[in-house]
Image: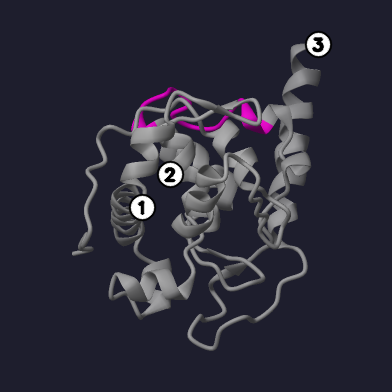
């Protein structure tokens, strides 16, 4: 019985990983052939077995960033999706330029830089959304309890402007990305993590 469960888990993991590598396309001339082009998995493609093995699943900040990264890229630093979003946290080129990161290949090959960029983006979004965080955290919108971590995750998905509009209209304004992921889903899925370690910063720097 134990062997059957073990091989079922291995088979599931193999199917999941293979879904990242099909239908590859060259999306940027600045990214060489060693980078992995992949589609971001949909919610239905993430099996319960895989979910249960997300690292650092506690409610600490590590839990937040690893859970979000797993949703974005499967936690892989070398991923580029079919729309050209890069790395573990799926950064767009415009966001990277905001932090003076212009060499996308270097970015893909540098995990420390990716982690620093994620912290910087969280700090920036926390500053931009500081009023909304102060007013809305603890309240419910469309049945979802609003938390700081949920707001930061939704801002990572949709941008601070879209989540700000969603909160200001009490959920009347909606947004989904090209893969169908919604702000409401991120608000719920990534709510309740401890993101107090992130300091709001108008001009965060990535060293």
Q: Specify whether residue 84 is painted magenta.
A: no
Q: Quadrant of residue 102?
A: bottom left
Residue at the farthest top position: 1
Residue at 58% x, 73% y: name it: 84
* 3 or 1: tag closer to the N-terminus: 3
Segment colored magenta:
50-62
Q: Is residue 128 above or below residue 150?
A: below
Q: Measuring from the top left, give residue 115's x and y in whole percent.
A: 33, 53
Of the two numbered discs 3 and 1 in the rendering, the one whose residue sits closer to the viewer: 1
- On screen, residue 28 versus residue 182, left or right, reads left
Identity of the residue drawn at 36% across and 59% down? 114
| Mark positioned earlier in the residue sequence (1 or 2) | 1
Residue ID at (72%, 42%): 43
Comparing marks 3 and 2, which lies closer to the viewer? 2
SS label for mark 2: helix
Q: Is residue 52 magenta?
A: yes
- In the picture provided, is 201 more to the left or to the right than 58? left
Q: Residues within 10 Å of mark 2 (few under 14, many from 20)?
A: many
Residue 152 marker = 2
Q: Which residue is mark 3?
A: 1
Check whether the beta carbons of the residues at disc 1 and disc 2 lie within 8 A of each other.
yes
The type of colouring in the image is: one colour
Which residue carries the number 1 mark? 125
Q: Nearer the viewer, residue 1 or 165?
A: 165
Mark 1: secondary structure: helix
Near-viewer residue (120 or 22): 120
Q: Quadrant of the C terminus?
A: bottom left
Q: What is the distance, in whole Å, between disc 3 and disc 1 at their CAs?
A: 48 Å
Instruction: State which quarter of the image contains the N terminus.
Output: top right
Crowd class of label 3 (few under 14; some 14 to 19; many from 20; radius 10 Å): few
Task: Residue 101 in the image: state x and y as whole percent.
Answer: 32, 74
């Amino acid at each position: 019985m134990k062997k059957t469960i073990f091989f079922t888990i291995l088979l599931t993991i193999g199917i999941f990983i293979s879904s990242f590598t099909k239908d590859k396309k060259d999306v940027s001339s600045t990214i060489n052939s060693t980078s992995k082009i992949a589609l971001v998995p949909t919610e239905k493609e993430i099996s319960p077995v895989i979910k249960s093995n997300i690292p650092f699943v506690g409610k600490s900040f590590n839990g937040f960033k690893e859970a979000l990264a797993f949703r974005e890229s499967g936690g892989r630093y070398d991923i580029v999706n079919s729309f050209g979003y890069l790395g573990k946290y799926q950064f767009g080129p415009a966001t990277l330029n905001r932090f003076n990161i212009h060499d996308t290949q270097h970015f893909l090959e540098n995990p420390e830089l990716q982690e620093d960029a994620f912290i910087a983006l969280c700090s920036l979004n926390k500053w931009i959304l500081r009023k909304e965080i102060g007013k809305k955290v603890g309240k419910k919108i469309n049945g979802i309890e609003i938390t700081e971590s949920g707001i930061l995750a939704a801002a990572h998905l949709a941008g601070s402007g879209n989540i700000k509009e969603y909160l200001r209209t009490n959920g009347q304004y909606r947004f989904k990305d090209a893969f169908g992921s919604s702000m409401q889903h991120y608000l719920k899925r990534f709510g309740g993590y401890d993101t107090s370690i992130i300091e709001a910063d108008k001009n965060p720097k990535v060293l």
